[in-house]
Image (cartoon, rainbow, N blue to C red):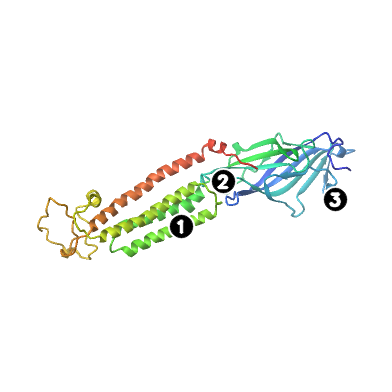
Amino acid sequence: MDNSFANWSPSEPTTVTVQMFINSFGSLNAANMDYNIDVFLRQRWNDHRLQLPGNRTRVTVLNPAVQAKIWKPDTYFNNVKDASVHKVTMPNILLRIEKNGDILYSMRITLKLSCNMRLHQFPFDAQSCSLTMSSYANTDDVIIYEWDPEIPIDMPDELEIAQFDLLEDRRVTESDTQVYVTGNFSSLKVSFDLRRQNGYHVLQTYIPTILIVVISWVSFWLDPKNAVPGRVSLGVTTLLTLTTLASGIRAQLPPVSYVKAIDVWIGMCMIMVFGALLEFTFVNWLANKKMTGEPSLAFRLPLALFGSEEEEVGLDSGVGDSDKVDSEAAPADTNSYQDPEPIGADPKEPRNYYNHAMAVDRLCRGFFPGAFVIFNLIYWPYYLMRQHTPQMMDDTTFGA
């Protein structure tokens, strides 16, 4: 039998009807930009040379040597990275011939397919991954592919994809003609639209980084002079922990040049933690700075706004309540600014800006949490709304 063509006349193209059953759908690999699927690929066409004589209605061909003598379409997947045919316990290939010459050629294959992902919204992204198939050697004057008109793509109801929801209402199949220098080839394409689930990243990334940022704020309640080791250790530890966590996140993603949603979050957390460390450096310098004259407005403003009648002083001198000075001390000159002296301080010692440092700490106790809350009120609604906006997915074009 001449199996160069499915029909006697080479000028008459063979129509191959394709139907796929998605047995399993592996999770998308963002680092490699690919995904795995396990499918039953079913191809149907008619070869009138194989019409069955007599009363037999169908024949199943199991012998590989006989299968090799029958014409079959040279179907391949354009965006495949790796593929394999299941061979346990026997090669998972079915070739069935109907009485009128209709042929069903079915095989179970596992495919690793490339998917050009756009990760601007990661991990609040929605991806569209495609599968494209066509003939490798036969142009459209020999083979024409078309999807099964009833059920082109089928899958089990309980199919689940790790970290993703498959949007079945946005599953698109289409037929096309691919034009190359070697000729025009009939092709089929199916696109799977997937929306990433947020639970995993909220538990593994967002909650830990929020806790790290909150822990860094504890330093605002520690004394800027006597708690130097504690504040330094707290700031450096939180910064290194956040850096390590960010490195683990980056290892899961490709080295793209644009800014992702997770980069915005990690960047803000870094600013918060590093800002708390820089704030300690400033207040420690301020608490040890000697007052040489009347303070400028920049030094007086924090104390005027965030100072209190009962200053948190005396901590740096280690003096208790028994060493408080007499409340009937001589009144200060009302015409010049006087920085409150720490309780129990030696009057011969030059005054410093310790109370100003405490006022800066009190300012940061409200400023840092407030800024972080405002950032969250902007960040979460913005990215969650974009993830569930169909227009965002429509604007995303993926090539095979």
Q: Relative to residue 355, is residue 117 depicted above or below?
A: above
Q: At numbered mark 2, what does the secondary structure look like: helix, strand or loop?
A: strand
**Mark 2 burial class by Cα count in 10 Å: few <14, some 14-19, many 20+:** some
Q: Nearer the viewer, residue 77 or 160?
A: 77
Q: Residue furthest front?
A: 292
Q: Nearest the camera: 55 or 266?
A: 266
The answer for how far apart the CA atoms under marks 1 and 2 are is 27 Å
Name the amino acid, label 1.
Thr
Query: Disc 3 marks which amino acid?
Result: Ala
Label 3 sits on residue: 65
In primary-sequence order, the first of circles 1 and 3 is 3
User: What number is the disc on residue 164?
Assistant: 2
Indicate whether 230 appears above or below 140: below
- In the foreground, 207 or 305: 305
- Amino acid beneath label 2: Phe
**Quadrant of the image occupied by residue 346:** bottom left
Horizontally, is 279 left or right of 7 in the view? left
